[in-house]
Structure formats: C-alpha cells, structure tokens
C-alpha cells in the first residue's frame, strides 16, 4: 500500500504520517516512512532519538553517493535521470522497529524544480518506492508534490490531502487535489484535522463532497502540547488512538495489502 500525504503548512501532515506509520507497523507490516518535506520532521514526530537522526544525514546531502549513482561530473553537465537506487534504500534508512525512515531533504537552490543530480536521485528514490513491491510506503510530501511524476503518480494508492477547517488551508487542499488528479493519482481523499466542533466539520463538508472526505481528526490538547514538550510515550498512545479512525478508513478504501 502506497500512501502519499500533502497539505498546507502546519495542518498536521507529519502527525498523520507518523500515526499511520506506527499503526501499520503495529499490525505487522514493514513500513517505509519517507520524509519528502523540505523541513524534515517526521523522524522527530516518530520519536527517533536525536543521535540516530544525526548519524544519518538526509539523502540529498550524500554528495558522493549521488555523484556515483547519477554519474554526475563535478563540473556539471550530463547525468543519469533515473539512477538505480533500489539496493541502497535499506542502507540509508533509519530503523525504528518495523519502520524504516528515509529522510530526503531538499535541494537548496533558487527555483523550485531543478534538473540537477540531487533531484534526479531523490525522484529515483520516490519512484522506486512507489513502483516496487513493498508492504507499506507512507510519504510525507509537505505542501509540494513535485517529486511525483506522471510515471509514478499511478503507483500511489491513495493521496491524503490534509486540511484544517480554515479557508486558506482548504484552498491549498483544492490546488493539491487538482494537481494530484492531473498527475493521475487514482484515489485522492481529504482528511480534516484539528476539528473542534460539528460546525467545523460542516464547513469542510461544504467545501468537498461527502465522498471526497475520508475522515476527521479531532483537535487534541496532548498532540498540540507535544510541539512544546517533545515526543513521549503518552503522545504516542494519543497519536495512535487519534489516527486509528483514518487508518481504518484507508484499509476500507484500499484494501488490506496482505490479503491480495
Ligand atoms: N489533531 C490535532 N490536534 C492538536 N494538535 C495537532 C493535531 N494535529 C497536529 N497537531 C499539531 O499541529 C502542529 C503541526 O502539525 P504537523 O507538524 O503534523 O503539521 P505539518 O502539516 O506536517 O506541518 P509542516 O507543514 O510544518 O510540515 C504540531 O504542533 C502538531 O502537534
Ligand atoms: Mg510536516
């Protein structure tokens, strides 16, 4: 099962990605959790210890590896657009029980999309994960889905577009929904997060059709405080129970991967 997560800044993408990764892992799946958001934080939200994160820099910083795989020469010029990366995924993943975390990092250059070896390398990682036969892949894309290409969008089983009950985040959600659909993502669903009242649910149900909305996550004080206090076991328990409803809906929508 390949799950992509996107949405406006701060709406709860990483929270949802971490919760889903843990729930799938708890059910016995091998999970690849991919942090493709430029400001990487999935590791921290998952509760990976700081030392472990420091020991494995984001993939975009693996200069030598990228040069080797893309056959890029130091002076620039030609490089391979679809380097082979299947064999290295596990070497550079941070392991947390059944979860393997891959942190992509971002190309720090002006302009959003550059045809450079780093991006070719990161795209190859996403492509390999989406098109290969892996149990569960969960990708936190951040607000941008530019690593998704027409060739790989169909490899996504479900795109979750997270939104708060606010006009600005709904507008972003609609743009992402449209882009994903143009890319060819087969199933796109909205998840309403930080819901405090029926009125807020109704607001989102007015913005999207009933069928487009996969589910809602209530606003939760403990989750909110985790941004002040950091990761803890208590947060984790709350995280899992908060995300369980959405997890069940995904299984309903996409089917239990193990039964196929
Ligand atoms: N249901 C919720 N109830 C309360 N707080 C929440 C909820 N979901 C997420 N949060 C909090 O909102 C903040 C933003 O969440 P998160 O980091 O998951 O968002 P994001 O979309 O990944 O943000 P970014 O765009 O910066 O990557 C965090 O402090 C998180 O703890
Ligand atoms: Mg995030």
Image (cartoon, rainbow, N blue to C red):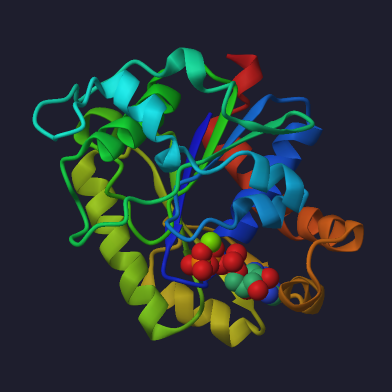
Looking at the rendered structure, the number of numbered marks drawn on it comes to: 0
Whether residue 120 is visible, yes or no, is yes
Nearer to me, 209 or 247:
247
Q: Is residue 83 left or right of residue 253?
A: left
| Residue 146 image position (x, y, % from top left) | 27, 49
Nearer to me, 220 or 129:
129
Which residue does the image show at 83% across and 63% down from the upper left?
235
Q: Is residue 226 left or right of residue 44?
A: right
| Residue 217 image position (x, y, % from top left) | 65, 66
| Residue 55 image position (x, y, % from top left) | 66, 40
Which residue does the image show at 16% across and 25% down from the upper left?
79
Which residue does the image show at 18% across and 60% down from the upper left?
111
- Image height check: is 49 above or below 238? above
Please identify the residue farthest to the left as the structure is shown.
77
User: Quarter of the image holding residue 227?
Assistant: bottom right
Whether residue 20 is visible, yes or no, is no
Q: Is residue 67 left or right of residue 135?
A: left
């Amino acid at each position: 099962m390949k799950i992509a997560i996107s949405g406006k800044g701060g709406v709860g993408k990483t929270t949802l990605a971490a919760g889903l990764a843990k729930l799938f892992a708890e059910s016995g799946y091998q999970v690849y959790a991919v942090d493709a958001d430029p400001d990487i934080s999935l590791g921290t939200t998952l509760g990976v210890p700081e030392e472990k994160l420091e020991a494995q820099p984001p993939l975009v910083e693996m200069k030598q590896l990228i040069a080797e795989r893309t056959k890029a020469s130091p002076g620039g010029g030609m490089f391979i657009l679809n380097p082979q990366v299947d064999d290295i995924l596990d070497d550079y993943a941070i392991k947390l029980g059944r979860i393997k975390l891959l942190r992509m990092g971002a190309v720090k250059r002006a302009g959003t999309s550059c045809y450079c070896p780093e991006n070719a390398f990161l795209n190859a990682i996403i492509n390999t994960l989406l098109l290969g036969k892996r149990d569960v892949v969960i990708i936190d894309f951040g607000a941008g889905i530019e690593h998704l290409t027409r060739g790989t969008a169909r490899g996504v089983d479900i795109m979750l577009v997270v939104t708060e009950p606010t006009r600005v985040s709904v507008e972003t959600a609609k743009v992402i929904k449209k882009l994903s659909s143009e890319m060819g993502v087969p199933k796109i669903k909205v998840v309403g997060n930080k819901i405090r009242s029926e009125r807020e649910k109704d607001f989102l149900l007015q913005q999207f059709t009933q069928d487009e909305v996969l589910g809602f996550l209530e606003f939760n004080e403990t989750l909110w405080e985790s941004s002040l206090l950091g990761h803890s076991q208590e947060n984790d328990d709350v995280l899992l129970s908060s995300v369980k409803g959405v997890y069940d809906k995904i299984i309903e929508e996409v089917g239990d991967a193990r039964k196929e």
